[in-house]
Structure formats: structure tokens, C-alpha cells
Amino acid sequence: MPQLNPKPWFMILFFSWVIFLTIIPTKIINHIQPNDPTQVDAKEHKNDTWNWPW
């Protein structure tokens, strides 16, 4: 029964964390966003309340 052999557990756990902590974040950071966000003045957008006459 291979699941009862604890010898490879540490290496499997270690290499999986190496992948999760080094390779995957670099792929996410290198992702190019199609539109760069720009700041918008709060004065330009006036939020009017809706009139619900009922």
C-alpha cells in the first residue's frame, strides 16, 4: 500500500509548495492587464438618489 509509505511525503509536500510559492505567483504577476485603471475625480460623478414615489 503506497499511501502508508511516509518516505516521499515530505518531498511531495515540499515540491508542491515550491511550485505554489514561486512559479504560480510569477505567472500571475506577469499577466498583462488590457486596460490600465485611471483615477476619476469624485466631483465628476454625482450620485443622485432615485425617486420612488409609492
Image (cartoon, grey):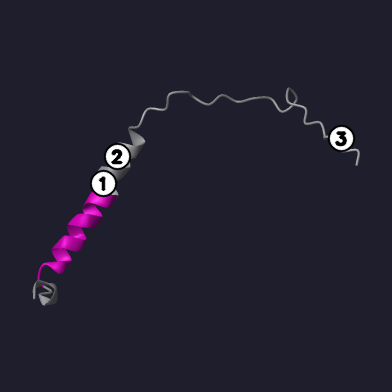
Q: Which mark is residue 54?
A: none
Q: Is residue 1 above or below residue 35?
A: below
Give, as a single range, the part of the protein colored magenta: 7-20
Whether pointer 2 and pointer 1 mark residues with C-beta atoms closer than 8 Å, the reply is yes
Disc 3 to disc 2, C-alpha distance: 49 Å
Mark 1 surroundings: few (<14), some (14-19) or many (≥20) residues within 10 A: few
Kindly identify the residue that appears in the image at 35 percent across and 36 percent down: 29
Q: Residue placed at 25% from the left, 56% from the top?
A: 17
Q: Tell me, yes or no, whether the highlighted magenta stretch contains residue 11.
A: yes
Say which element carries label 1: helix
Q: Mark 2: few, some, or many residues within 10 Å (few <14, many ≥20)?
A: few
Question: Nearer the N terminus, badge 1 or badge 3?
Answer: 1
Q: Is residue 6 left or right of residue 38?
A: left
Quick one: 6 or 21, which is closer to the camera?
Answer: 6
Residue at the image point whose x is 13% and y is 73% from the top: 3
Q: In the shown orientation, is residue 51 left or right of residue 46?
A: right
Quadrant in the picture for the C terminus = top right
Foreground tag (3 vs 2): 3
Mark 3 Cα shell of 10 Å, populated few (<14), some (14-19), many (≥20): few
Residue position marked by numbered label 2 in the rendering = 26
Residue nearer the viewer, 43 or 5: 5
Camera-near label (1 vs 3) is: 3
Most prominent secondary structure in the magenta stretch? helix
Q: Secondary structure at mark 3?
A: loop
- Residue that label 1 marks: 22
Residue sitting farthest toward the front = 54
User: Which of the 4 image quadrants contains residue 24?
Assistant: top left
How far apart are the alpha carbons under marks 2 and 1? 6 Å
The residue pinned by badge 3 equals: 51
Q: Amino acid at mark 2?
A: Thr
